[in-house]
Each structure stands twice: as structure tokens, then as C-alpha cells.
Image (cartoon, helix red, strand yellow):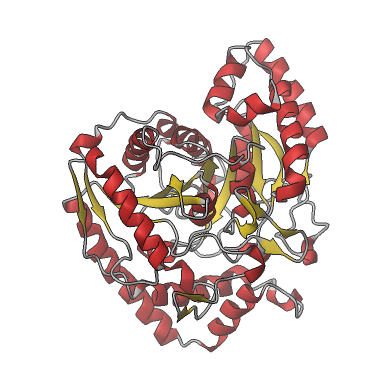
Amino acid sequence: MTPEGFQRLSATEAARRVRRAEVSSLELVEASVACIEAVNPRLNAVVTTAFDRARLEAAAADASAARGDDVGPLHGVPVAIKDNQRTAGIRTTLGSPLYRDEVPEADAGIVARIRGAGGIVMGKTNIPEFSIGANTVNRLFGATRNPFDEELTCGGSSGGSAVAVASGMVPVATGSDHGGSLRIPASYCGVVGYRASPGVVPNEERTTTQTHYSLQGPIARCVADVGLMLSVIAERTATSGLDPMAFPLDSARFAALDEVDLSRQRVAVSADLGGVLVSNAVRQIFEERVSAMAPFFAALEPHAIDLTSAPDIDWHLRQDVFVSQYLDMADAWDDDVNPNVLATWNAALTTSMRDIAAARRRQVELYREFTAIFEHYDVLILPGVSVQPFPWRDGNPGEIDGVAVDNYMAWLALTAALTVIGHPVVSLPCGLDHQGTPFGIQVVGRMYGDHALLSTAQAIESAFSTVDALRRPVPS
């Protein structure tokens, strides 16, 4: 297996070839190592490697397959893990110098399920400190670069995972999502990110019982691989009961998506969810892409849904989540800790319970208004991010078309508003923008309609592949 061949190989095809003994897991691992060593010094996506352990696990996987053992759906496939998810025996830093030498004794649930399915962990991917922010830069490892332009941001917080997948270091990786951390880097790097309905993917380490935050999910180069990965990380195991949101489901069905006839699909579109902050450039590109994709669907119609109050609700709800999530860590923070973390923490300490309660009440109202869309439409399509990739050194954009960006979440309204609502969202590549970087869209489905949404997304992906302006871009 050459590195070039590996970079084009999907996880689904890799697993199939290993099962058929057409390629060995060790060959895949060595090809992944070669790609990481060749590309990572420039992009800085993988911050901790586990190559020797991966080789040993690959050899064991090959021996198991040779014996005819039953193997899991990811058997022998290289995988990268986001650095806020614990990996037994492999450093897990949370992107912070405060945890630079932390080596967990046990895997997080999502990692245990990947290993149990035969996945081979190649290493950990970069994040902003404590995984808070949409620009993957931290003071421990520095910046992860966009694979299409190394001076621009790759997004965040799952930026290292998106870059590792986009550049061919691994076919699939894990991520997590508060206000867009799976979807934003997927949009900026030209890959697929999936935020499932809350409770689909167990998170045994969540600190808030019922919430649309603290979700975990997959990043891949195609929808089929997202489905394959989801079938593994959504599996119900002995530990899944530790997450009170993990409802019963058959996760295996995500690996087999349905065929969808797009000519029978009715699609709602919105450029700005009723008026949240979106740049003129993104609006123009989105309008062009909507025109190009319109012939695929039975109907593609603007929708007047108004989520303009959702960003403020998100700001209040994330304060509530932050206090529970970082309650036992805040005393250890130094003066140089991620300013995004401090901004939310300090706001939480001065926000009244009445304001939090009012935000939760409004959240329920918005949910009920939003879910009515799916009485008439199969999916909603909107842009992936309010502004296209900017220089990573800027941290966050200071303004968008002359409008000041008030805080680190204000430019993320298109993703954060959907977090407030909670419906499942898949981020799909949709060609390149005027500066040669990927443009992404969000495709939103019915709550708990994850299988149907991914099936539709796969059909859209296939249709996009036939149009130059819409197909997934590949970095050189």
C-alpha cells in the first residue's frame, strides 16, 4: 500500500480489503505513518503519535484475521483521536500545558468502542486549549494549518482531526461538538463532519445530564465512512448506561444507508436563519451553490425560520454547561489559559439564574418552531460557517463586513443556533470559494432521524460529485 493509495482509500474500503486479505492492517498502518511523517510537519494536525503501539496492534489484527476470527467493522483501520478524549497509555493533554504529561489509565468510552471494533489508534489530534474555540491554536502545540492554505485557520475545535482526514493521514477521526466543533473544521477543510441527535453517541464523561452540548462524533472524507464510524461509536456497551442520554438504538444500521431519490426530496434553504451574522461573501457563494444544486431536488425553497435569538440563548446555556464541566479544574488555571474559556467562565459567575432559566424557556419555544419545518420539508440546508477561513494568527475575526464580533461565539451563529435546537446536522463539502478554500454546507434533518439524514446526505454527496462547482475539493 503506497502512501498515495492510502490517502485515497476510504475507511469502508480499507476495512473491506483487510477482511478479504487483499491488504494487511500493518500495510495500512505503515502507509498512515508515512503520510503523517510527510505531511504533519507542515500542518501540525497530529500532536502525539502512537506508531509503535499501532504496529503491534496491526500485527495482532492481521493474526486475528488469518485465524478466521470474527472481526469488527473497523478491523485494522487507522484512526485518529481528538486530544480531549482519553486514550489509555497515550498522552491526552486537552491542548493545555497544564496537562502536557497526562497519560490516562483507561480509554474514554468512544475510544474503547473504536478499539473494540478493531480500529488502530495512530495518535491524538490538535485542539484549542480545553477544546474551546473555532480556531485550532494553543500554547502547547501551536497552530494547526488549513491544508488548502497554511496561513489560514482550519477551524475548530476538532481542527486537528479535520486536517488529518482531509490531508490523508487517516481515513477517519473522532471529534466533539459544542457550538460547531465538528461542523466548522469540516467546512473549512473539505470533509464530512456529523453532529448526531443528542444521545445517539454515548458520552460517559458528560457532566450535565440532559443537554445539547458535549456531543461526540465522526469526521471522514465521505458520508459512508461517517456512517461506518457512527455505527461503532454509537454502539451500546456495558458502559453506555453511564450516560443518562444514551437511549436504546441499533447502531449497526448506520453502516448501511438507504438509497434516496433526491428528485422526490423537498428542501428548505436559509442563508442566515432569519438574520444572524453572515458575511456577504458567504451569502453570495451560498446563493450560487443553491442555484447549482436546485435541479437535483423536487423543491428547493427559501424558508423564513427565525433563529436570531438563538446565539444569545447559546451564550447563556454554554455558561451553565461550563460551570459543571470545569468546576474541578478552574482553580488550576493560570493567567494565560485560553481566553475563550475565561470569557465564558467569568460570564457564568455574573449571570443570574433567572437569565439562564429564561434562555432555557426560549430554547424550548425555538425547538417547537424549528421542528415544524419538517412537516413540509425533508431537510434544511444552510451555509456551514458565517465567514470563510481567515488567518489563523487572528484568533477570531474582529469584524464581519464592518460589524464588530462581540465575543468568540458571535461569528459562529450558524452552527451554535443549531446546537440550541438540537437537531442532527451533517456538514458536507460544497466546492471551493473565491480564495481557493473549501466551502461547506450544513444539512439538517428531523430530530432522531439520523439514519434518514445520513442517507439523504449520501445522495447529495453523490449528486455533488457530478458538478465541478459542488464536488468535494482535495488539497494538493
Label count reads: 0
- Residue nearest the viewer, comparing 204 with 442: 442
* Image position of 220 (left or right of 224): right
| 240 is higher (above) or lower (below) than 168 | below
* Residue occupying image coordinates x 66% and y 27%: 4
* Residue occupying image coordinates x 38% and y 56%: 285
Residue 57 point in image, percent of width and height: 74, 28
* Residue occupying image coordinates x 45% and y 77%: 316
| Res 203 seen here | no
The residue positioned farthest toward the front in the image shown = 434
- Residue nearest the viewer, comparing 243 with 389: 389
In the rendered image, the quadrant that contains the C terminus is top right
Residue 405 point in image, percent of width and height: 49, 78
* Residue occupying image coordinates x 51% and y 62%: 178
| Res 441 seen here | yes
| 250 is higher (above) or lower (below) than 400 | above
In the rendered image, the quadrant that contains the N terminus is top right
* Image position of 365 (left or right of 450): left
* Image position of 143 (left or right of 369): right
The part of the image, by quadrant, that contains residue 421 is bottom left
Residue 406 point in image, percent of width and height: 50, 81
- Residue nearest the viewer, comparing 440 with 211: 440
Residue 471 point in image, percent of width and height: 42, 39
The part of the image, by quadrant, that contains residue 331 is bottom right
| 151 is higher (above) or lower (below) than 466 | below
